[in-house]
Image: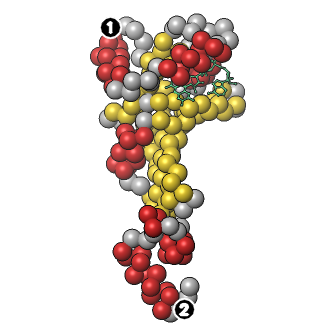
Amino acid sequence: MLIHELTDKECFDALARFGFGRLGCARDNQPYVVPIYFTYHEGHLYTFSTAGQKIEWMRTNPRVCVEVDENTSPVQWLSVVVFGHYEELPDTPEYKSERNLAYEMLQQRVTWWEPATYVAFHHHRGADPLTSVFYRIHIDRVSGHHAVPGPVESATLPAPERATKSEGRLLSLLRRARII
Ligand SMILES: Cc1cc2nc3c(=O)[nH]c(=O)nc-3n(C[C@H](O)[C@H](O)[C@H](O)COP(=O)(O)OP(=O)(O)OC[C@H]3O[C@@H](n4cnc5c(N)ncnc54)[C@H](O)[C@@H]3O)c2cc1C
C-alpha cells in the first residue's frame, strides 16, 4: 500500500465532496464524537444542530476536530482530519448574512436537518428539541492521507483496484527480477 499526503486544496475538495464526518469535541478531558452532516465553504464547515450535549460542550471549549473518510478497501482509502474552532451563528442582525449563507448551503442537502431533530425529539435529555443552532467550524489546520494499492497488493486485487500503468511497469520489473 502506498500512502500519499494530500495538499490543503485536495483536503478541501474532499470535504466539499463528502459533506459527512465525525465531529469530536471535549470537555473536562472527556472526548465526545458524533456523526454530522456539513457543507464546506471557503475554509469553514457549516452545519446545524439542535440544543444538546455537543453544543453545550463546544460553547465551553470551542476547539474541535472533524474526521472524514472514504474506505474503498483496506488498501484504498482517503481520510481528512480538520483541526478547528466552533463559532455559533446566532439569530441576530450581526450574523444575518452568515446564517443565510449557512441555511442556503445546508438546504442543498435535503435531509440535513433530519438526524439532528430526530435524535433531539426521541432522546433529548432536558434540551429543548425545537431550539435550532447554526454554527460553523473555522478550519485552522487540515491534513489528508490517500492510500492506493502498492505493487504487491495490485497483483492480488480484483481488476478495478489493480495498479496504475506506472505501478504496473514496476510490478513487471519486480517479477522479472524475481523479487515478487
Ligand atoms: C448519519 C447521521 C448524520 C447526522 N447529522 C447530524 C447533523 O448534521 N447535525 C446534528 O446536530 N446531528 C446530526 N446527527 C445526530 C448526531 O450524531 C447526534 O446524535 C445529535 O446531534 C445529538 O447530539 P447531542 O450532543 O446534542 O446529544 P444529546 O441529545 O444531548 O444526547 C446526549 C447523549 O446521548 C448519546 N448520543 C447522542 N448522539 C448519539 C449518537 N449519534 N449515537 C449514540 N449515542 C448518542 C450520548 O451518550 C450523549 O451523551 C446525525 C446522526 C447520524 C447517524
Residue at mark 1 to residue at mark 2: CA–CA distance: 71 Å
User: What's under tag 1, amino acid-wise?
Assistant: Pro
Labels in figure, total: 2
Residue 98 in view of the camera:
no
Relative image position of residue 55 (x, y in whole percent) = 56, 19
State the residue lying farthest toward the front.
159
- Whether label 2 lies within 8 Å of ligand 1 gets the answer no
Judging depth in this view, the residue of 6 and 19 nearest the camera is 19
Relative image position of residue 5 (x, y in whole percent) = 45, 58
Tell me which residue sits at (59%, 11%) in the image: 121
Q: Which residue is mark 1?
A: 93
Q: Within the image, what quadrant is residue 92 found in?
A: top left
Q: Within the image, what quadrant is residue 101 found in?
A: top left
Pointer 2 local density, CA inside 10 Å: few below 14, some 14–19, many at least 20: few
Tell me which residue sits at (39%, 81%) in the image: 169
Quadrant of the image where one finds ligand 1:
top right
Residue 180 in view of the camera:
yes
Q: Judge depth for marks 1 and 2 and give the one in front.
A: 2
Q: Which residue is mark 2?
A: 178
- Asked if residue 37 is positioned above or below residue 83 in the image, the reply reads above
Relative image position of residue 9 (x, y in whole percent) = 34, 48
Q: Within the image, what quadrant is residue 162 found in?
A: bottom left
User: What's under tag 2, amino acid-wise?
Assistant: Arg
Pointer 1 local density, CA inside 10 Å: few below 14, some 14–19, many at least 20: few
Check disc 1 and report its element: helix, strand or loop.
Answer: helix
Tell me which residue sits at (48%, 12%) in the image: 132
Q: Which mark is residue 37?
A: none
- Asked if residue 38 is positioned above or below residue 71 in the image, the reply reads above
- Asked if residue 146 is positioned above or below residue 1 in the image, the reply reads above
Q: In the shown orientation, is residue 32 left or right of residue 63? A: right
Check disc 2 and report its element: helix, strand or loop.
Answer: loop
Tell me which residue sits at (49%, 86%) in the image: 174
